[in-house]
């Protein structure tokens, strides 16, 4: 499998890629995912700028602007060869696009690192291997810190493609978001409170979905503490703590 990484709100994509490399095809389930062509949306008269504005207000964007780095610690749960596996995850991010993902699962420590210009991911031996070509380009583009604050930046395409209904949530607005150099994503924004409750990213012709819940405030910023992925693989991340402005060492984002 090729590597596909993504930013904070799409953490499962990073872990999907590293797990695929570290545990091989036995890790991948028979879950068929969702074909992009089967998705149907209802037209809406809402304006994309209004949806973005309400969404940013709901997440506490003004407070988010003062966040320069972030650490997130939690528990990772998945199935490997038909058996439940539980591990721990540590994510450290720093503006503008540095990050370090560490997953400890079974007897393996899986790493994914971006230093702002280069990126590495663990292989089956545990060694960090550099990403190259289109994979590196997408990884760097998707590694943007606090991407929600950059939706109106030059080169970012955001379209409001309609509405749909999501179980337990109700009506949602569906945004098609494409950052420069990356693949398009689908962002589902709840009409009731403008929280981002789901995102979809293409992986091998199907969509890897991430569903967000257990929303809590940290220093005035609203985060989902529970992230559930489904598609090419199913797994869950439950965060215990999220901290701001911890000032990580520069070595955190280096491969050596």
Image: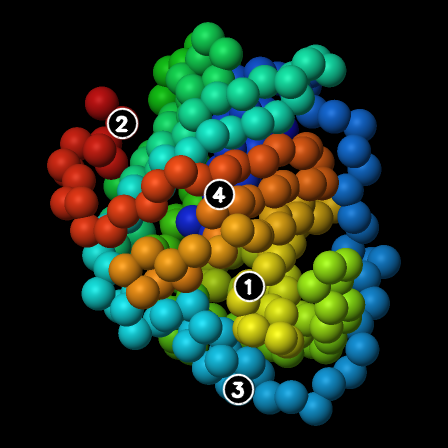
Q: Distance between the residues labelled 3 and 1?
A: 14 Å
Q: In this view, does 43 lie to the left or right of 96?
A: right
Q: Which of marks 1 and 4 is nearer the N terminus?
A: 4
Q: Which mark is residue 11?
A: 4
192 vs 81: above or below: below
Disc nearest the viewer among 1 and 2:
1
Residue 218 appears in which quarter of the rendering?
Answer: bottom left
- Residue identified by numbered label 3: 50
Q: Distance between the residues labelled 1 and 4?
A: 14 Å
Q: Earlier in the sequence, mark 2 or mark 4?
A: 4
Residue at 60%, 60% in the rendered image: 197
Label 4 sits on a secondary structure element that is helix
Q: Is residue 128 visible?
A: yes
Q: Can residue 201 be seen in this view?
A: no
Residue 48 appears in which quarter of the rendering?
Answer: bottom right
Q: Across the whole image, how many numbered discs are drawn on residues?
A: 4
Q: Residues within 10 Å of mark 4 (few under 14, many from 20)?
A: some
Disc nearest the viewer among 2 and 4:
4
Q: In this view, does 85 lie to the left or right of 141?
A: right
- Residue identified by numbered label 1: 196
Q: Residue 255 carries which label?
A: 2
Residue at 73%, 59% in the rendered image: 168
Along the viewing direction, whichever of 171 and 210 lies nearer the viewer: 171
């Amino acid at each position: 499998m090729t590597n596909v990484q993504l930013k904070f709100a799409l953490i499962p994509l990073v872990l999907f890629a590293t797990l695929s490399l570290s545990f091989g095809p036995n890790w991948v389930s028979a879950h068929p995912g969702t074909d992009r062509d089967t998705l149907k949306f209802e037209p809406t008269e809402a304006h994309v700028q209004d949806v973005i504005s309400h969404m940013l207000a709901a997440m506490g964007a003004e407070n988010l602007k003062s966040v320069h780095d972030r650490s997130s610690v939690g528990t990772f749960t998945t199935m490997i060869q038909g058996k439940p596996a539980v591990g721990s995850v540590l994510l450290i991010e720093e503006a503008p696009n540095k990050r370090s993902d560490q997953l400890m699962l079974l007897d393996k420590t899986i790493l994914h690192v971006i230093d702002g210009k280069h990126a590495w991911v663990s292989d089956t031996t545990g060694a960090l291997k550099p990403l190259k070509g289109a994979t590196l380009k997408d990884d760097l583009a998707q590694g943007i810190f606090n991407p929600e604050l950059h939706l109106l930046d030059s080169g970012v395409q955001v379209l409001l493609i309609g509405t749909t209904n999501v179980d337990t949530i109700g009506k949602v607005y569906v945004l098609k978001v494409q950052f420069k150099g990356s693949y398009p994503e689908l962002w589902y924004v709840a009409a009731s409170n403008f929280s981002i409750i789901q995102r979809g990213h293409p992986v091998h012709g199907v969509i890897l979905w991430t569903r967000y819940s257990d929303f809590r405030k940290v220093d005035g910023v609203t985060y989902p503490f529970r992230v559930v992925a489904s598609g090419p693989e199913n797994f869950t991340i439950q965060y215990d703590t999220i901290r701001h402005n911890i000032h990580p060492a520069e070595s955190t984002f280096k491969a050596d």
